[in-house]
Amino acid sequence: MFQCIKQKKIPVLFVGFLLLAILGSAVFAQTWYASGDGGAVAGGGTMKSADAGIEILQDKEGTAADAAAATLLVLTLEDRSLFCVGGEVPFIHFEAATGEIKCLSGQGRAPLDSQAIDWLLANGIPDPDASDNIKSAAVPAVIDLCVTAMQQWGKLSFEEVAQPALRILDNGGVSWYDELAATLRKLIESEQNTSGTYEEKLQAVSDRFYRGDIAEDLDAWYRQEGGFLRKADLAAHVTNIEDPITDTYRGYTINKCNTWTQGAFILQTLKMLEPFDLKGMGHLSTDYIHVLAEAMKLCFADRDEYLADPLFEDIPLEELLDSGYISLRRELISMSRASDSIISGDPINKLARNPNPHPNLKWPKGTTTCCVVDKWGNMVACTPSGWGSNAGVGSTGVVHGTRLISLNNWDDHPNRIAPGKRPCITLTPTIVTKDGKPILAIAVAGGDEQEQSTLNLFLNFLEFEMMPKDAVSVPRFTTNHYTSFFSQTPPVLARLYVSSNVPSSVLTALSNRGHDVRTMSVRSNPVMIYIDHDDAMYYAAGCPTSNRNCKAYDKPANSDGYNNLIKSQKIEIKAQLNKVEIHYYLPDAKKISQISIFTAKGCFVKDLPVKNEPGSHTITWDGKDAHSNSLPSGCYIVRFSQDEMSMSKRFMLTQ
């Protein structure tokens, strides 16, 4: 096994969060991954969502919050079967100037009318496919979420961020596009006609939607369609600005929204897994898949038992994440046998098994993705959703979601529906930091698969040193050993879904341990953005088989006043079995001092021959270190250096 004996010190130009370019072009042929030094967007639907974000970042010089708002508005059109203006958007933001992370509760509440709640308790909350599912609509949260994000961290007007969506709406093609375009233009009109500060102008946008004539039109439509929402519910809506809930894993801090989402699940799961040598087990080995699945089963049981709106319920979050309690729960994991029981714990009394668990719950579906990073290093991760109701749209063109289905009517359960209560939802964006710097933004569409895929991606990155495009595209696995978020069906005990391209020997070994193994294709749709602070680069990627779209751009040459030898290069790496070809182009004879190979952790491997003549060059590396020892498969770095600058590109070596 190769070990890092010394680290070769190579000077790196530090430009904060303004990142160096790898490719000489701002246009990328791929749609599912991209990299650049000026900004990056990872979205869903069609490429129009990522285009909207890049337009705001690059052409308008907007912030990550501005770009996220523009991307979200386009996603309501380009991913309209999964997200709508009447839906919801949990939102996490990292502010580069202060290092502060805040969460926005872009989640609508249940109606305030107690009679409406009584009806839902007595008759049940209509399923997303029910004819009267407008009764399951929460207050539409998207417009106020966008306004609040821009008030906090934006610089552009609502008119500017709405333009990409308006262009799509004006091109037509869907019956309600004209009505929604008219609604957006009313909001822009209110912004333009309001005097005052930037924040006050934006507030006029929200006020007209939630408290003005648009709210009145919505109220009339609710009554016409038999819905329970009223103008009073809209007027009371507010996007809460909250601190994230956090925990650490091997020096990285994972930041999640509070317990009105399932975010605590991954914090608990990672804490349970930390003592295990996951890397030593091997990626997608029998032991690795088994221990992750068993930890997730235990943490899903606690999720379903305890998580709810913390404004209404006393959630034992500190106790759920207590190391002593986690240790007790960890002892329930058998490495030789899969659990076939739902086992929640009792964190208050520090019991590994809860003697009085609640019954099964019921949850909804329909989600897309959005992550953004701007040239200042501000980062956004959000998980937009909205499984549209069957009521269609009224004069406003606003499609509503059915998110109240995430609440239940079980006696004494913390997630029981109540007037003005937020449902506990699967939507769960992630920002990962280290030493106060943002490292990853992750968003996943896929209901109960969301946090499981986030776990897969995070461990792919941290334990197995994968870059985003590899982390999102390698095989994944999930369990169905939880209360369904899609229906009232009970858990499928011991069920384990594994990508079909995992070796059959692993599948057989998992079955022998008691897992009910099924092979799967895509069951979730992740995107992620990685900031490489050493190499000063943004890397974005989304699942290549599920319409995830990414785009990035580069800063103009000389924008930071430094010698642009490296800026002018075009670098391509072709990694083959036992051989890596490094292709690069020099426009003139400016001297490169070193071309070196490092491990992903920064350990020096070998210097390569340097060619400084103008034109195209190819260097071949045989996958061996300076002592002719073959290196293991994994992620490596080629670093070009000149004077006090360097630039790097990562690649995967397969032996």
Image (spheres, rainbow, N blue to C red):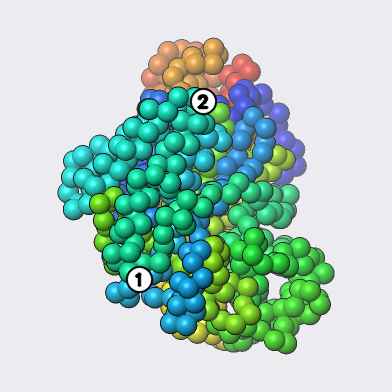
Image quarter of residue 523 = bottom left
Nearest the viewer among 50 and 90 is 90
- According to the picture, the residue beneath numbered tag 2 turns out to be 197
**Tag 2: Cα neighbours inside 10 Å, few (<14), some, or many (≥20)?**
few
The disc labelled 1 sits on which kind of residue?
Answer: Asn
Q: Secondary structure at mark 1?
A: helix
Q: Residue 399, percent across and down?
A: 32, 56
* Residue 525 is at least partly visible in this image: no
Which-is-in-front pick, marks 1 and 2?
2
Q: Which mark is residue 294?
A: none
Nearest the viewer among 53 and 534 is 53
**Up-down relation of residue 414 to residue 628 (above or below):** below
Q: Residue 551, percent across and down?
A: 39, 38
* Residue 274 is at least partly visible in this image: yes
Residue drawn where x is 34% and y is 62% of the image:
222
| Quadrant housing the N terminus | bottom right
